[in-house]
Image (cartoon, helix red, strand yellow):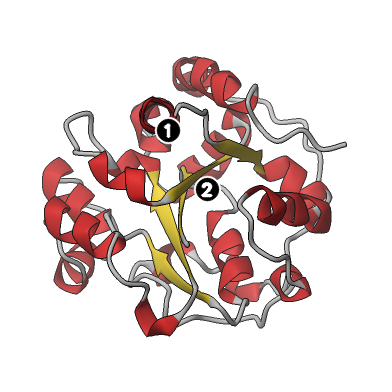
Amino acid sequence: MKIAMWSGPRNISTALMRSFENRKDTFVSDEPFYAYFLKESGEDHPARQEILNEQSSDWATVSKMLTGNIPNQKHIWYQKHMAHHIFKYSDLSWIKHVTNLFLVRDPKEVIVSYQKRFPLTTHLQLGYNQQVQIAKTVADFTGDFPIVINAKDVLINPKKVIMMLCDMINIDFEEEMLSWPSGKRDSDGVWAPYWYSEVEKTTAFQPYIQKNVVLDSRWKDIYNSCMADYEFLNSSSMIIT
């Protein structure tokens, strides 16, 4: 099985990758379209040149690789993707051959976290619009809207949500998915030193803490641009009972 987990930045996407990587039957890939995004956008992200040196920036090459044989003779290939690495003209035909899942988080929480690390100038940096584009494409291909999970639900009850997710995609749940060794991973992207300092300290999903997030007025337009897409996706998220 090949799993494409579509997230935006400043979510729990790396922690979820840790969860799947802790399975003995799973190989993980960290943001394989990052170099493609940097080449197409011209964005000057931290470790830009290292990423371009490390990964292929050719869309066709990467998408062919992602639908090929699962590396290391594993049974599951978990691919962590950033939706904002995809452009409207990107050929999404390859996603017919993988199981597409979507991870969402409240835009207020994402904006507050993101702008502390990186300049935020447009809602497109946060990936909600692209997630909707990809999800609708999946629905067109398959006839069914893809599975959506909310980061808040995962953090409130990791075991229940991960068990439900495994059941929905027809793989066995393993207790090992609920904890992992702290530290760096060989599978982490070369950008990890700039983004993964917090997740490297973790050994499990961190408890959800309800915060009274008040956005500065300068972020209101970006927030409003994200909300319709977030609410559209979240309305289809897994119902946790």
Answer whether residue 208 is visible to the viewer in this image: no
State whether residue 214 is above or below residue 66: above
Residue at the (66%, 47%) spot, across then down = 168
Q: For residue 189, which quarter of the picture?
A: bottom left
The mark nearer the N terminus, 1 or 2, is 2
Q: From what the image shows, is residue 188 above or below residue 153?
A: below
Residue drawn at point x = 20 percent, y = 46 percent: 43
Say which quarter of the image contains residue 24.
Answer: bottom right
> Which residue is drawn at the image coordinates 45% and 21% (left, top)?
222
Say what amino acid the circle numbered 1 marks.
Answer: Thr
211 vs 11, left or right, is: right
Asked if residue 137 is positioned above or below residue 177 in the image, the reply reads above
- Residue 73 horizontal/vertical position (percent): 41, 83
How far from the left and from the top, in percent, is residue 110? 56, 38
Q: Residues within 10 Å of mark 2 (few under 14, many from 20)?
A: some
Q: Residue at x 76, y 42 (%)?
A: 153
Q: Is residue 56 left or right of residue 78?
A: left
Q: Label 2 is placed on what type of residue?
A: Arg
Disc 1 crowd, CA 10 A, few/some/many (<14, 14-19, 20+): few
Asked whether, in this view, residue 55 is left or right of residue 158, the answer is: left
- Foreground: 84 or 218? 84
User: For numbered disc 2, what is the local secondary structure?
Assistant: loop
Q: Residue 37: in sight, yes or no?
A: yes
- Residue 76: x, y in percent? 50, 69
Q: Which residue is mark 2?
A: 10
**Dividing the image into 4 quarters, which one contains the C terminus?**
top right
Residue wearing tag 1: 142
Which circle marks residue 64 in the picture? none
Q: Nearer the viewer, residue 164 or 107?
A: 164
- Label 1 vs label 2, nearer the camera: 1
